[in-house]
Image (cartoon, grey):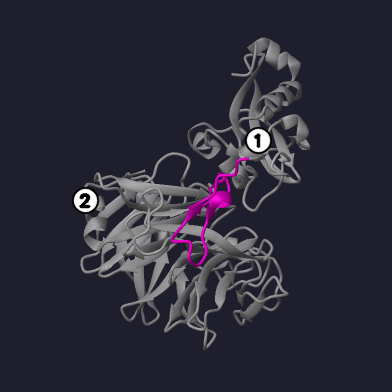
Amino acid sequence: MHGSARLYHWLEEEQISLAFTTYQTNRLFLVGRKENGHLAVNERLFDKPMGLYAKDDSLYLATRYQIWQLENRLGRNEQYQHGDRLYVPSQAHTTGDLNVHDVVVTAAQEIVFINTDFSCLAKLQAGYSFVPLWQPPFITKLAAEDRCHLNGLAMQDGKPTYVTACSETDEAAGWRNHRVDGGIVMHIPSSEIIARGLSMPHSPRWYQDKLWVLNSGTGELGYLNGERFEPVTFCPGFVRGLAFWKNFALVGLSKLRSKAFTGLTLETRLAADQMTAQCGLAVVDLNTGTVVHVLHIDGVVEELFDVLVLPGIRQPRALGFQTDDIDRLISFPGSGGLIVTKPTVKRPGLSQPTQTAGLPRPSQIENAEELPVKYQRVYHLTPENLLPYEAMTEPSLQKRWQSQPPRGEITGIAASLDGELIGLVIAEAWQEDEHQHAELLSSYVLPAYRHLSIERKLHQHLQKAIDPLSLRNQHDLK
């Protein structure tokens, strides 16, 4: 991750920091400034983080089956590890897997969100996974079928007012056949469609008396002028995640990685300009439409979802579930700030592997033999049905398929714990010149389990699964 020449100076001049989510690699990123002129990047693991919202001194984060409130636990002028904000997961509402996209906090202090799987706007309420508030008139039934891919939510005067969807279809996953020009924008109070013909629109935001929208399938930031979408600038990526600061827009960019991104106008335009899709953040001058600063992201992170500006913050940090900081950082009225507890004896229960919110910590797991890990062969693998597991492949298989399509049978071995995937190895076997060959394509284990012998056992199971003749001729998996 690296910024363009003046990104650091711009953040310093504006006295702001940034936050963004990537569900593709399960991370919340906080980007601030160190004193030495370098960017300060803090990342925390959450399960499929998507919608992100800031209210008062808290962040609200939609994850796979929970909506979290992360509240700042630092007092004024207090710091922790050079950070001037420390966002701690403090409350969570378990919704179940609703594929929640945008989330907001209204003027009435209600947490409202886009329930994409059930094609509705919803809120949290005790005793329920969610309470539906509104649904497009063309949606005839609340069913977990992602009928129109309702995804973006804009507020006006503290009230949910506009939504975006990829289509106006009423059948399960019907939006997938309308990605090029089926996108719509709707006005919630009137339930009317106010714009059509968009390509996978996302991240509607009301700002400076305009409704701004990302026309993701064309790579454009723009606004609605009546029913017409007026593009302001083109960005070299699938645009998703939008925030504003003064006369600037911050736009999230994603690479064209999955099948859902293919066949779009964006692809054609990039090819015509001999460009490739990028991942990162673009800062756009609204007066000129010029991209003035960029945060480039390379490596395993290829997609972003939501973006925030954090005013008046120099170096934000957050606590996750992977270290014992969340155990030991304590505060209470009159404590004078954070207290770091230092237990001197081994407390009961810490020696046993336990499942905590988020992901298990390495300190809680001492021996893989004590874990009920299930190893299972996965059959009939293709580049398409491997897409949902891209975050569990290293190196990236999607990058591989772009330059080198499969040559033979793809075989996988999965390691799971209590039904959750924690490791995956993939190999390919093919015949060439009357000889059998096999190659290891990907090997990945979640960080919390890498100190155990799980990856070694995955490879052992894979060796047994591949035809022994293939291995003899090749001597071993590469």
Q: Marks 1/2: CA distance?
A: 40 Å
Find residue 32 and report its horizontal and vertical position in percent. 34, 53
Q: Residue at x 46, y 48 (%)?
A: 43
Mark 1 = which residue? 424
Mark 2 = which residue? 6
Find residue 153 and report its horizontal and vertical position in percent. 49, 73
Residue stretch rendered in magenta on the structure: 319-344
Give amino acid for label 1.
Leu
Mark 2: give few (<14), some (14-19) or many (20+) Cα within 10 Å: few
The answer to whether residue 130 is left or right of residue 442 is right
Res 20 visible? yes
Q: Residue at x 68, y 37 (%)?
A: 365
Q: Residue at x 66, y 36 (%)?
A: 423
Give amino acid for label 2.
Arg
Q: Residue at x 48, y 82 (%)?
A: 107
The answer to whether residue 261 is left or right of residue 253 is right
Magenta stretch encompasses residue 52: no
